[in-house]
Image (cartoon, rainbow, N blue to C red):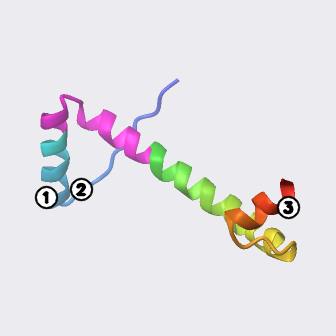
Amino acid sequence: MSTTLTIRLDDKLAQKLDHVAKRSGRTRSDIVRDALRRQLAIALLDEVREELVPRAEKHGWFTDEDVFNDVS
């Protein structure tokens, strides 16, 4: 299944998108889908980080080294 989404871009952003599409040989849709996937992954990572950081800090884990030292 696929869904069609219509978005409006300002002229400058549309020009940048067209430039990248032309140079990469990809379609504008492909580039936008890829950008959306990346942005959604970042948003999910931010959500997980928000939940885990307070828990880690309660254990005294502030850096990767702190975690490494406790599990080694």
Q: Amino acid at mark 2?
A: Leu
Q: Is residue 33 magenta?
A: yes
- Residue at position x 66%, y 61% from top? 47
- Depicted 22 relative to depicted 11: above or below: above
Residue 35: image location, x then y, percent: 38, 46
What element does badge 2 sit on?
loop
Say what amino acid the circle numbered 3 marks: Asp
Secondary structure under the numbered disc 1 in the rendered image: helix
Circle 1 is placed at which residue position?
11
Vertical placement of 23 versus 39: above or below? above
Residue 26, position in %: x, y?
A: 23, 30
**Mark 3–mark 2 distance (CA, rounded to whole Å):** 49 Å
Neighbourhood count class around disc 3 (C-alpha, 10 Å): few under 14, some 14–19, many 20 upward:
few
**Is there a contact, CB below 8 Å, between mark 1 and mark 2?**
yes
Q: Which residues are magenta?
A: 21-36
Disc number for residue 70: 3
Mark 1–mark 3 Cα distance, whole angstroms, equals 52 Å
Amino acid type, callout 1: Asp
Residue named by callout 2: 9
Instruction: Name the residue nearer the viewer: 26 or 61.
Output: 61
